[in-house]
Amino acid sequence: MKTRVVVTGLGVVSPIGIGVGPFWKAALEGRSGITALSSFGELPLDAYRSRVAGQVLDFDSVRFPDSLHADRIDRYAQFALAATNEAVADAGLRMEQERPHRVGVIVGAGMGGMVMGEREITRLYQSQKPNRVHPNFIPMITLNSASGIVAMAHGAKGPNLTISTACSSSAHAIGQALTCIRSGQADVVIAAGADASITPLVFAGFCSLRVLSTGFNDQPARASRPFDRARDGFVMGEGAGALILESLAHAKKRKARIYAEVAGYAATSEAYHMVIPREDGEEVATTIRLALKDAAATPAQVDYINAHATSTPIGDVVEVKAIRRVFKARAEKIAVNATKSLVGHTLGAAGAIGALTCSLAIETGQLHPTINYEEPDPACALPGISADVQERPIKVALLNAFGFGSNNAAVVFKKYA
């Protein structure tokens, strides 16, 4: 019998709120976190095709202890640490009472320390002084800097891993945390995802790739519109999400609050294209089927899907095709929403924020609206997508996450019983 794994703590940094309480209130209100892009210094914003983003505008790193030297930590790692601190506190996890080698950290990140990376390379070429590069440049820009900092901050000495599979990174981090606990390598895993890549070069790169929304530069709140006929690309976001995963036995022993059970996970590669998914949806459907099998759940039991739904013309259609392949007639009855309509695409943080949303939906029976869903696109319309809050009991929830490089992930959550 597989070891049961549960979610006992949540934390989030997002464009609609820092902290689970503010995030969830804003989500249920259908509040958009998409705003006009902040200045990139001397670079003219009108040179960018897209000029909107899901920015975390009120983040304050002074909340960290002095020993962590926030100025030596890239913005994405600061987000990861803030979300983790909240999740650890929410779980009531007291590290001094834990065996440190039984507590792991697995973080998903798509881009890593891009704020510091771009800043230092610009300074180097402007100053022509290699000896003035920040002494912490290398440890700050490595993709595993967030997982290392989180582990050090909390004294977690178990498995410490970073998963980087672009937009599916933190969904894979949660899945690997599940595997880690099931295999007996840890009792507790801090599973998180973070990215802060709204930077001059990265943003320009996504613009050049022509995947960002450009038609709503004067109406930022309307730009992210999954499944809507007028969608024209995704909106860049930033932030972090963190979940505390524990074996059920460990959680019960310390009488922890349980949000949900992480019941199943699957990871596949389409081996098809670096950016575009296979258009018939079959590979995504296979991933969903494998996750349901791992969770010992059937398509008929799924009540809710937190969709990947980036708001791209192709991606949303492919995901709905996959849902229809797996769930058939049941697809007409499942509730579906798109968290990215509220916060944009937070890249490596997207899966973790979606997982947090699944956990809250299971606990509260409330599903946030998919905003800007004004004129459903017949190619990707489902009856369960709504621009309003939905209230219904959720026993089984599915999280979808797909990333550049043909990466697919699906995670299944169940109501704890």
Image (cartoon, grey):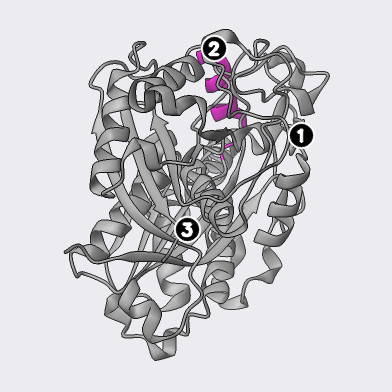
Q: Secondary structure at mark 2?
A: loop
Badge 1, how many Cα within 10 Å: few under 14, some, many 20+?
Answer: few
- Residue 246: x and y in percent read 36, 70
Q: Which numbered disc flags the more N-terminal residue, 2 or 3?
A: 3
Circle number at residue 135: 3
Q: Amino acid at mark 3?
A: Pro
Circle number at residue 38: 1
Q: Which residues are magenta?
A: 197-209
Q: Is residue 76 above or below residue 307?
A: below
Residue at mark 2 to residue at mark 3: CA–CA distance:
43 Å
Residue at mark 2 to residue at mark 1: CA–CA distance:
26 Å
Q: Which numbered disc flags the more N-terminal residue, 2 or 1?
A: 1
Badge 3, how many Cα within 10 Å: few under 14, some, many 20+?
Answer: few
Between circles 3 and 1, the one closer to the viewer is: 1
Q: Amino acid at mark 1?
A: Ser
- Residue 407: x and y in percent read 32, 31
Q: Which residue is mark 2?
A: 313
Q: Is residue 13 visible?
A: yes
Residue ID at (49%, 49%): 355
Split into 4 quadrants, where in the image is the C terminus?
bottom left
Q: Quadrant of residue 151?
A: bottom left
Q: Main secondary structure of the magenta part?
A: helix
Q: Is residue 355 above or below residue 21?
A: above
Q: Secondary structure at mark 3?
A: loop
Indicate yes or no whether the magenta region holds residue 96.
Answer: no
Q: Are marks 3 and 1 in contact (CB under 8 Å)?
A: no
- Residue 104: x and y in percent read 33, 68
